[in-house]
Image (cartoon, grey):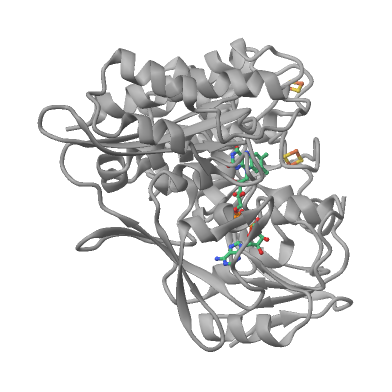
Amino acid sequence: MVRSSLKDEIVQITCRVNGKTYQGAAEPRTLLVYFLRDELNLTGTHVGCDTGHCGACTILMDGKTVKSCMLLAVQAQDADITTVEGLAKDNKLHPIQEAFWENHGLQCGYCTPGMLMSSLFLLQRNPDPTEEEIRRGIEGNLCRCTGYVNIVKSVKAAGEKMRESGKASGKISK
Amino acid sequence: MTPKKFDYYAPTSLREAIKILHTKDDAKVLAGGQSLLALMKLRLATPSVLVDITRINDDLSFVKRGKDSLILGSLTPHDVIERNETIKKLFPILADAASKIGDQQIRNRGTVGGSCCHADPAADLPTAMTALDPLFVVRGPKRERSIPCAKFFVDTFTTSVSKDEILTEIRIPLLPRNSGSAYIKHSRREGDFAIVGVGAAVILDSKGVCKDVRISLGAVAPTPIRAKSSEKYLKGKKLNESAIGEAAEKANEEADPPSDMHGSREYRLAMIKVFTRRTLNLAVSRAK
Ligand SMILES: Cc1cc2nc3c(=O)[nH]c(=O)nc-3n(C[C@H](O)[C@H](O)[C@H](O)COP(=O)(O)OP(=O)(O)OC[C@H]3O[C@@H](n4cnc5c(N)ncnc54)[C@H](O)[C@@H]3O)c2cc1C
Ligand code: FES
Ligand code: FES
C-alpha cells in the first residue's frame, strides 16, 4: 500500500517519543525538528543551523543518531524516537547528564542536547572509548563555548559511570 | 528553512515506487535525504513529488558476497559500509571512504546508492567506486539494466539513471589474490568535502609486479575520473618507491580541477600527486 500526502494536506503523524505515543499534525514538508518542537512541544531538541552541520538537533531514531533537521516529520511515522527529554528518569539525571554537569561539559548549553544524544549513541556502542574515539563520535556536534576539552572529559566520565552501573548493556544493533 | 511544497509518497514495494516515478512529473527519489533535503531546504531543488524508498519491503539494504562479486544494496548506510567485516576484508577502500563521510549522524542516515546517484564529484564513495569498476543495477518500469561504472557518472550531479529508474544494487567484481585497495581523502577539516580524494586498487603477481591497477580521482573534474597515464605506467612494473613516485607525478595529467574556496586549481593539481603516492603506498601495503 502507498501512504501518500498531497502538498496542502495536513498529515496526522503517530510515533513513540521517549516511550510515550504521540500524535501530531504536519505538512509533508515540515522538518522533523519543528514537528518535535512546535507540535509536540519537546523544545529540548535545538535548531542551530538548519543545514545539517551543527548537530544541535540530534535525536535517536530507531536506535541511531540522526539530525532531525535533515528528516521530514512524515518520515517519523511509527518511529521510535528518543530526545534529550527522555534521558532523565524519575527526577534523576542520566549518568551522561551528571557527568557533563560535574565536568563543566557545557557553558551556554545550546549544543548540549545534541552532544548528550551523540554521547549516548557512542557509549552504547563503545562503552570505554579512547579520547580519539570520543572526538570522532562527537564530530557532528559543534560547540561554540567549551573548546571541547571538558566535553571529552565528560564523555569519558560518563562512560565510567555507565560501566559501573551496568547501564551500557542496552546495546544498539548494527 | 523549509522546502517548497511537494506531494509525499511512501510506497511499500519497488514496483509501486517505480510506477509513481513513471507517472508523475517532476518526481524524485528520497533515500537517506542527506543531500536531497539539504538542496530542497536551500530551494536549489524543488521537486513536486517525493518518493520515499526507505519504507519499501524489498530488501535494498544488504552486503552480500556473491561468487565473483560483492553486492551492496543501494540503501546500505555509510555506517554499515564503514564497519562491515566483509567489506573491511575484501574492499578496505570502501570502508576508508565511508568512514570519512560527514559525521556519525550523516553516516547513520546517508546511503551508498544515494551518494552515487547524487554524483557530487567531491563525494567519497563515487570516487572509491570508480577504482573498483562496478556495475550499477537499476530497475525501471519495463526492465532491469546494468550500467558499467564508466557510463554511470555523466556530469556534475548527473548520472545515466533515468527519472523513472531506481538504483537497486551495486555489483563490485572481487579482486584476485595479491591485491590491495585504499582511499585517502584530503580535506582541511574533518567532515568537510574532499579537496582531493584518491582511490586505488592494485593487483600484483607473486613477485610484487603490478598486473593491473586502477587509480581514481575525486573533486578534480566534473565526475570522478581515472588517472590513466599513471595506471599505464605502473602495469608490468615492480611497485617500489621509485615506480610509485613516478606514477604519482603523472597522476594529474587527466585532471581538470576547479578553483574554489577549498583550494585553487594549482593546489589541487599538486595535491593529486601527493595523495596518489600515499594512496598507492597504502594499497600496496595491504596487498596479500
Ligand atoms: C553535513 C553533511 C556532510 C556531508 N559530508 C559528506 C562528505 O564528507 N562526503 C560525502 O561523500 N558526502 C557527504 N555528505 C553527503 C552524504 O554522503 C549523503 O548521504 C549522500 O550524498 C546522499 O545519500 P542519501 O542516501 O542521503 O541520498 P538522498 O539525499 O536521499 O538522495 C540524493 C540524490 O540521489 C537520488 N537517489 C537516491 N537514492 C536513489 C536510488 N536508489 N535510485 C535513484 N536515485 C536515487 C535522489 O533522488 C537525489 O537526487 C554530507 C551531507 C551532509 C548533510
Ligand atoms: S540544526 Fe540540524 S544540524 Fe544544525
Ligand atoms: S556550550 Fe555553548 S555551544 Fe556548546
> Can you say whether A146 is above or below B201 in the image?
above
Q: Nearer the viewer, residue B71 or A97?
A: B71
* Front residue of B41 and A94: B41
Direction from residue A32 to residue B277 in the image, left or right: left
Query: Is residue B24 something one can see in this rendering?
Result: yes
Q: Residue at the location (68% across, 53% down)?
A: B157
The percent position of residue B288, horizontal first and vertical second, equals: 16, 33
Image coordinates of residue A165 in percent, x first then y, are: 38, 29
Q: Position of residue B19 (x, y in %)?
A: 62, 87
Residue B48 in the image: state x and y as whole percent. 82, 73
**Where is B24 relative to B267, above or below?**
below
Residue A148 vs residue A125: left or right?
A: right
Would you identify the image quadrant in which residue B172 lies? bottom left
Residue B7: name its quadrant.
bottom right
* Image position of B145 with respect to B250: above or below: below
Residue A158 is at least partly visible in this image:
no
- In the displayed structure, would residue B154 be above or below residue B91? below
Query: Measuring 43% from the left and 65% from the top, which residue is drawn there?
Result: B169
Rendered image quadrant of residue A171: top left
Viewer-side residue, B43 vs A118: B43
Q: Residue drawn at (57%, 23%), measured in percent from left and top?
A: A98
- Judge left or right: residue A39 versus residue B135: right
